[in-house]
Amino acid sequence: MTQDNTLLITGAGNGIGRATLMHFAGKGWKVIGLDKDAEALAELRDALPREKALLLTCDVGREGEVAKAFERIAEWLGGQPLHCLVNNSGIADPYCGPLEDVELADWQAWIDASLTAAFLVSRAALPHLRRADSASIANISSTRAVMSEPESFAYAAAKGGIDALTHSMAVTLGPKIRVNAIRPGWIETGPWQKSAARSHPEHRDKDRDQHPVGRIGTPEDIAGAVDYLHGAGFVTGQHLNVDGGMTVKMIYEH
């Protein structure tokens, strides 16, 4: 990987997005981050060289805002390629309450923040990705796409849509662009929030011990998965569980 490589990530301000952006910046990549949280982006802007980072306030679930952001992105890239796109945006809270109480507007908010955003940003990014000899897209899904706790309908539907979008994009955009999904499990994002929201939660032993790997995940784990998939030239259309083994653990109450 060279210093000319460029990453674009949505939901860049906090959590998984912040960690992934900083991971690739630390490898010498140029980074582009989109997020609604202007305060979080301002912190990142102060931490990164101006010539190596473009951080734009944008609601990526809205077509007009995405179009406006990509006008600036195209100018900043100056005809150079985009090598890796990470569709990470979404509403972090999976719980929407009883099905009969969910308003259509609330349902749509979950869908737009994750699934619609992935469509809009991928569509806008395609001309820039196609300039690379080889490019990748990582869609951040969730283990909740394939398993659920109660009252998480909209979140699960959005992430299930991300999984389906991923395999459809993979067979359509290859061979130059590979597309995979990452399904995080329990990821503790507190230390990777902006300063005003940062936290360092203390987890119970049983929270850690229930995972076959013996710990809760970190945003750095997901950043590493994005890095792996970008370099894995024979991998496309896959859904990578990064969950400490929880989705393969058979759980019955005794």
Image: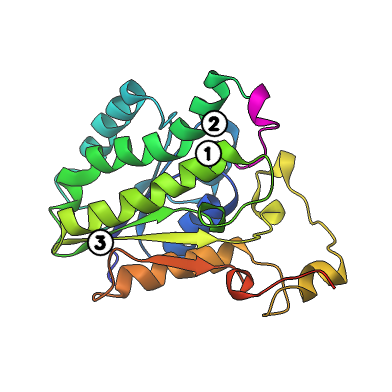
Say if mark 3 contacts mark 1, CB within 8 Å.
Answer: no
| For residue 156, above or below residue 237 | above
Please give the residue where the numbered disc 3 appears in the rendered image: 4
Tell me what residue is drawn at x 46 percent, y 69 percent.
Answer: 225
Stretch in magenta? 88-101
Position of the C terminus, as image quadrant, is bottom right
Report the Cα–Cα distance between label 3 and label 1.
22 Å
- The amino acid type of the residue labelled 2 equals Ala
Say if mark 2 contacts mark 1, CB within 8 Å.
Answer: yes
Quadrant in which residue 156 is drawn: top right
Q: Which of 72 and 153 is in front in this view?
A: 153
Please give the residue where the numbered disc 1 appears in the rendered image: 41
Residue 250 lies, in percent from the top left, at 66, 74
Residue 75 covered by magenta stretch: no
Please give the residue where the numbered disc 2 appears in the rendered image: 38
Q: Which of 128 and 233 is in front in this view?
A: 233
Label 2: few (<14), some or many (≥20) within 10 Å? Answer: some
Residue 89 lies, in percent from the top left, at 48, 42
Q: In this view, does 40 lie to the left or right of 175?
A: right
SS category of the residue bearing label 1: helix
